[in-house]
Image (cartoon, rainbow, N blue to C red):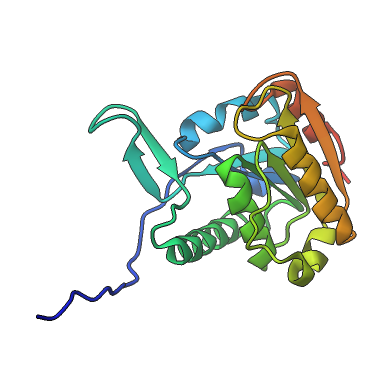
Amino acid sequence: MSRPSSHSIRTPRTAHYVQYGAPAAAHTLWIVLHGYGQRAADFIKPFQAIQEDAVCVVAPEGLSRFYTKGMQGSVGASWMTSAGRLDEIRDYLAYLNRLHASLCSNGGPRRTHVLGFSQGAATACRWVARTSAPVDRLTLWSGGMPPDIDLATHSGVFRQLDISLVLGTDDSYIEMSEREALARRLHEHDIEATSYTFDGGHRLHTDTLQKLASEGELA
C-alpha cells in the first residue's frame, strides 16, 4: 500500500491592512506589525496618538486567521506557525514587499519606520533583512530577533538602521535579560540600538510611542 505524499501549490491571497493618514502626503511611513492573535484594526488604535499630516501609519494583518476560543467569536491573526514555516515566511515577505510598493507607488514618504510587536518583531526582522525596500528605522517592541537571522550575513543592513528595543517592566512574555542579550548580540556585530523601558506589561504604551515619533522622524 502506498503512503500519502505531501505537495504544495502557490495561490493568490487577499491581504488586509488598516491605516491612519495618506502615504503620498506623509514624510514618514510607519509599518506596524501586530503580535500573535491580534487584529490590525485593534492593534493600530494606540498609534492614533502619533498620527498627523507628516505621519502615515499602516498596520498589515497576518494572513492566517483563527478563532481565539472555540469555534466562534473573537478572531485573531498570526504571521506564521511551525507548520509550513518556510512557506509562511516566504508568503508574508512577498506580501509586505507588495504592500510597501503599493503604498509608495506615488513617490511615497521619504522615510520608513518598521515596528514589530511580539511575534511581529520576528516578522519585522526577517522582512527588513531581506527586502529591497528602503527602511530607515526598526523598533522591536516586546519581542526579539529570531535565531534564523544570521547577523554575520545581514549586519550591513541592520547597521544602517536606527534601531530601538522597547520593553515593559512587567512583560509576562519576555524578560529584561532577553532584551539585554539581544542588545549584546547586536553590539557584537557593531550594530547600535537604543533601549526604552516603560511601566507596564505586554502592550503598546502611548507615551513611549510619542517619544519614538518625536525622536529623529524629521531627519
Q: Is residue 11 left or right of residue 38?
A: left
The single residue placed furthest to the bottom in the displayed view is: 2
Rendered view: 3 above or below 31: below
The spot of residue 131 in percent (x, y) is: 64, 66
- Nearest the camera: 124 or 167? 167
Q: Is residue 192 left or right of residue 32?
A: right
The spot of residue 157 in percent (x, y) is: 78, 64
Residue 115 visible: yes
- Nearest the camera: 176 or 114? 176
Quarter of the picture holding the N terminus: bottom left
Rendered view: 57 above or below 101: above
- Nearest the camera: 106 or 205? 205
The single residue placed furthest to the top in the displayed view is: 199
Rendered view: 214 above or below 161: above
The spot of residue 205 in percent (x, y) is: 69, 24
- Residue found at x 49% / y 29%: 42
Q: Quadrant of residue 180?
A: top right
Q: Is residue 18 left or right of residue 76?
A: right
Residue 131 visible: no
How many circles with numbers are drawn on the protein?
0
- Residue found at x 35% / y 32%: 68
The spot of residue 186 in percent (x, y) is: 82, 54
- Residue found at x 23% / y 76%: 5
The single residue placed furthest to the front in the displayed view is: 1
- Nearest the camera: 217 or 211? 211
- Residue found at x 79% / y 28%: 197
